[in-house]
Image: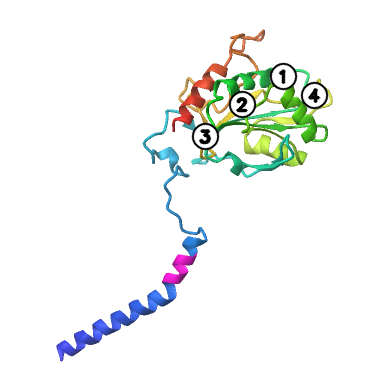
């Protein structure tokens, strides 16, 4: 009798496994094909916990314990092409907010960015994302003329325009880089002269400050040649170049 019960048990188990395979395995395969289940081999939200061996010493900007990542965006560049954050995947890039009629800091910022562009001209995985804060004036045609004027040649350097509210939200919330309208200042707009540095996985990165915290941004106005401006601000372009090189090796 014991032998017969054992056989019944095997038959029952086999039947259950057969039913499971018929019902659930096709569903699992469909989820894998649909991208719901993936193998996580890249730096993810756990990247700050040392999940990879080739990370540099650059820090991640963390919000509520999570590494801050570039939010989704979609704008039109100087060529009239639609550009999204996905176009920068697997690239190290610098972010700025500017406008073409800016009479003060923008020309200095973009001359510094062109110098950085030329330093990394041999790297296909380096780029720049420039967002205009005066999209009503800065059409793709205006942006293209601006790019030609400043010698912007990197194919991964997109000067983008689009909905003003979306651009301001991206600046002030997405990157925490101030941008706004102010009729009382030269040019009618005001914005930070800082650059943000993004790694190949879309995370904001920077080096430590004197207290061991992320610097978050890099000053973009003072050039390497100047070293220091009339207000006593020291240049950080050389620092930015060093950190771009580190991220390109990750």
Residue 76 x %, y % = 72, 40
- Secondary structure under tag 4 reads loop
Chief secondary structure of the magenta portion? helix
Task: Name the residue carrying label 1.
Answer: 107
The residue lying at 45 percent from left, 55 percent from top is 38
Where, quadrant-wise, is the C terminus in this rendering? top left
User: Tag 1, which secondary structure?
Assistant: helix
Q: Is residue 123 left or right of residue 11?
A: right
Colouring chosen for the image of the structure: rainbow
Image: 219 above or below 17: above
**Relative vertical location of residue 118 with respect to residue 87 in this rendering, above or below:** above
Going from N to C along the chain, the mark reached first, 4 or 3, is 4
Secondary element type, mark 3: loop
2 and 3 marks in contact (CB < 8 Å): no
Q: Position of residue 233 (x, y in %)?
A: 61, 13
Q: CA distance from mark 4 to mark 3?
A: 30 Å
Number of the label disc, if any, that sits on residue 195 = 2
Separation of residues labelled 4 and 2 (CA atoms): 19 Å
Marks 4 and 2 in Cβ contact (< 8 Å): no
Q: Secondary structure at mark 2?
A: strand
Assess whether mark 3 and mark 4 are in contact (beta carbons under 8 angstroms). Answer: no
| Residue annotated with mark 4 | 101
**Residue 120 has which mark?**
none
Q: Earlier in the sequence, mark 4 or mark 2?
A: 4
Q: Earlier in the sequence, mark 1 or mark 4?
A: 4
Whether residue 91 appears in this view of the structure is yes
Disc ID at residue 199: 3
Gap in angstroms between the C-alphas marked 1 and 4: 9 Å
- Circle 4: is it few (<14), some (14-19), or many (20+) Cα within 10 Å? some
What's drawn in magenta, residue-wise? 25-30
């Amino acid at each position: 009798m014991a032998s017969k019960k054992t056989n019944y048990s095997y038959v029952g188990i086999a039947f259950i496994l057969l039913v499971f395979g018929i019902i659930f395995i096709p569903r699992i395969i469909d989820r894998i094909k649909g991208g719901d289940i993936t193998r996580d081999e890249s730096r993810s939200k756990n990247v700050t916990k040392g999940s990879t061996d080739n990370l540099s010493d650059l820090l991640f900007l963390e919000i509520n314990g999570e590494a801050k990542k570039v939010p989704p965006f979609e704008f039109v560049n100087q060529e009239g092409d639609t550009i999204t954050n996905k176009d920068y995947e697997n690239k190290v890039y610098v972010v700025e907010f500017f406008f073409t009629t800016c009479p003060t800091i923008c020309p200095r910022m973009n001359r510094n960015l062109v110098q950085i562009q030329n330093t990394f001209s041999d790297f296909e995985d380096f780029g720049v994302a420039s967002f205009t804060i005066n999209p009503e004036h800065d059409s793709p045609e205006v942006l293209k003329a601006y790019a030609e004027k400043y010698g912007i040649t990197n194919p991964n350097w997109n000067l983008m325009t689009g909905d003003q509210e979306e651009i301001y939200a991206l600046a002030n919330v997405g990157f925490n880089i101030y941008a706004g309208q102010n009729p009382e200042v030269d040019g009618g707009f005001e914005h930070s002269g800082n650059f943000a540095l993004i790694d190949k996985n879309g995370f904001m990165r920077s080096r430590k400050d004197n207290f061991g915290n992320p610097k978050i941004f890099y000053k973009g106005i003072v050039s390497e040649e100047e070293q220091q401006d009339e207000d006593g601000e020291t240049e950080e372009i050389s620092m930015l170049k060093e950190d771009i090189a580190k991220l390109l090796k990750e």
